[in-house]
Amino acid sequence: MTSRGRMLLISGPSGCGKSTICDRLREDPRVVYSVSATTRPPRPGEVDGKDYHFLSKEEFRRRIEAGDFIEHAEVHGNMYGTLRAPMETAIREGRIYLVEIDVQGALQLKALDVPGIYVFIAPPSLEELRHRLEGRGTESPEQLERRLAKAADELREKDKYDYVIVNDVLEEAVAKIRELAGLGKEPA
Ligand code: ADP
Ligand code: 5GP
């Protein structure tokens, strides 16, 4: 099956399974993952150019002024942005440009009328979301409560997306998204 070049945006609350789903989608050679730029320092194990483009504050500001970002936002005191050039290149080459982004960023892209398939990943329930965040074990109890409260607000935005996919059984969610992107059910 062939696919047309376009942006595939995956968004949703923290813990809904964005990274897990995107890791699966990235197994397909027709998919190019959008690497964001950030001013936050790399965490242990993070690789420049793969996890993020790690930029100094000065460099980030310079690139805002140069118009290099489609959107950028300050999150927890650091700057994050989606770069324009790699998206344009991938789409021109007929690839699926995969953008994994929080709800705030997704709605910014939507407001800018960036064309693409906007997918909201919903957890089966807020209770299940709590279990998954607890299971991931990357947040302190306070951070976890904050993320859950934010998730309840973010869920109210789901109708602004083109599609809502409930991430209950991972394989099924991935297959549905692959179909939406014209990739066929199974990886090539
Ligand atoms: P996000 O990137 O949206 O914050 P993650 O991909 O890190 O979310 O997923 C949060 C946790 O939930 C991880 O521990 C992940 O392994 C788990 N998870 C993701 N999808 C499923 C699923 N369909 N069923 C059960 N657990 C899942
Ligand atoms: P982290 O520092 O934990 O990797 O990410 C912190 C937050 O920044 C997350 O909510 C993540 O979704 C958001 N983020 C990452 N990249 C971008 C981006 O390019 N644009 C926007 N607006 N937010 C981003």
Image: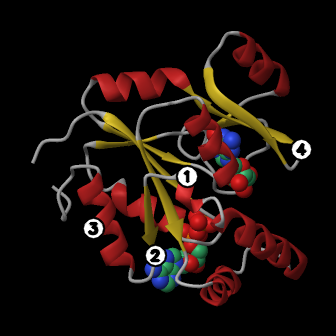
Q: Residue at x 31, y 56 (%)?
A: 27
Quadrant where the C terminus lies? bottom left
Q: Residue at x 53, y 71 (%)?
A: 122
Task: Say which residue label 2 marks.
Answer: 167
Q: In which quadrant of the rendered view does residue 78 lie? A: top right
- Neighbours of disc 4 within 10 Å: few (<14), some (14-19), many (20+): few
Mark closer to the observer (4, 3): 3
Task: Say which residue label 3 marks.
Answer: 175
Give the Cα separation between the discs numbered 2 and 4.
Answer: 30 Å
Q: Amino acid at mark 2?
A: Asn
* Residue, far front: 159
Task: Say which residue label 1 marks.
Answer: 160
Q: Amino acid at mark 4?
A: Gly
Is the CB atom of the residue marked by disc 2 within 8 angstroms of ligand 1's nearest atom? yes
Give the Cα separation between the discs numbered 1 and 2.
Answer: 18 Å
Tell me which numbered mark, 1 or 2, is placed earlier along the sequence: 1
Q: Which mark is residue 77?
A: 4
Q: Amino acid at mark 1?
A: Lys
Mark closer to the observer (2, 4): 2
Mark closer to the observer (4, 1): 1
Residue 73 on image: x %, y %: 76, 37
